[in-house]
Amino acid sequence: MTAINRMETCGSVNGGMSLPLSLPLSRPLPLPLPQSPEFARACEVLGLPVRVIKRVCGADERLRWQVQSRRLPLLGAVELISRGPVAAQPDTLQDWLHGFRRWHGARPLLLNAQGLSADALRRAGFWPVMTPATLALLPLGPEIAMRAALHQKWRNRLSRTERSGLDVQRRPPRTGDWVLQAESAQAAQRGYRALPPAFTLAFEAANPRAVQVFEVSDKGVPLAAAVILRHGPMATWQIGHSTGAGRRSNAMNLALWSAMVWLAGQGHTQLDLGTLDTRNAPGLARFKLGTGAVPHRLGGTWLHQGVLAPLARRLPQRQAA
């Protein structure tokens, strides 16, 4: 099934949503991976339904959200908006919250909120499902500034690895790639959910050169690899895997640093390093923050469903936070 696209201009008034034409043009919206056109194209390759809805002023995109379809126990067919909608200005998000039923009707809607307050969501009839996650977002820029932002231990390990003579290669992903297979096996072993290798290959097929693998090896033997997905001004570290020898030699520091420098050179301004889980993966959280990444708290996961909406509006504020 192909992506369904819908675009509306900001001059029209629809469902309580209207954007003034006098707003100045903005830079391209910084779209997280699940809200990016690249993600929608990859889903299309895999035959997964995605609806793309956006509001524009002239050539300037002011609001965008992509809707995935899911089937869940008890709820049945559910629409999912992951890390969206994304708006150029905060007021536009509030307008969306007032008029979202125009696009979603009475269908159950799961919203992984970004930029919307718990109180506003509760008043709109959304029920809290999961507490907010925290991401590590890394600003990208001049190499000297990024190196200065590294935590001292992270920088020292990188310096030692740079002097060790290891090889660094940037390449596209391959069918049967060792790093994709290693990530799939690790996810199954540890019981966490991850995008399957097929998604990485579909992302590259739909967006040529948008997937880059930064691989560190010693005399041809892979030690570590970082798989990066590129989407607009942002990029996402999708997979990182080190062998035992790679962990002992801090090869991932070199792989990720090489990715940071290359991405900045290509004009990317931010690298999403994924969730910070200080309880179950404290070492990985320290590694991510050691790059100079900034913690970014999302708004949690919320459900809008007809029966629950009146109850959600009466939910005490402390329980919705």
Image (cartoon, helix red, strand yellow):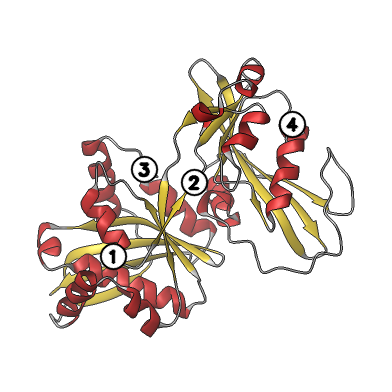
Query: How would you rate the neighbour count of disc 3 (Cα within 10 Å): few for under 14, some for 14-19, many for 20 or more?
Result: some
x, y (%) of residue 15?
83, 37
The alpha-carbon separation of the residues under discs 3 and 4 comes to 30 Å
Query: How would you rate the neighbour count of disc 1 (Cα within 10 Å): few for under 14, some for 14-19, many for 20 or more?
Result: some
Classify residue 66 by image quadrant: top right
From the viewer's perspective, is the residue at label 4 or at label 2 nearer? 2
Give amino acid for label 4.
Arg
- Residue that appears at 34% across and 55% down: 175
Q: How many marks?
A: 4
Give amino acid for label 1.
Gly
From the viewer's perspective, is the residue at label 3 or at label 4 nearer? 4
Q: Earlier in the sequence, mark 3 or mark 4?
A: 4
Give amino acid for label 2.
Leu
Residue 248 sits above or below residue 8 on the image: below
Nearer to me, 18 or 117: 117
The residue singled out by tag 3 in the image is 194
Q: Earlier in the sequence, mark 4 or mark 2?
A: 4
Q: Secondary structure at mark 4?
A: helix
The residue singled out by tag 1 in the image is 290
- Whether the residues at callouts 1 and 3 have beta carbons within 8 Å, the answer is no
The residue singled out by tag 4 in the image is 101
Q: Secondary structure at mark 3?
A: loop
Nearer to me, 300 or 102: 300
Report whether residue 121 is seen.
Answer: yes
Give amino acid for label 3.
Ala
From the viewer's perspective, is the residue at label 2 or at label 3 nearer? 2
The alpha-carbon separation of the residues under discs 2 and 1 comes to 20 Å
The alpha-carbon separation of the residues under discs 2 and 3 comes to 19 Å
The residue singled out by tag 2 in the image is 298
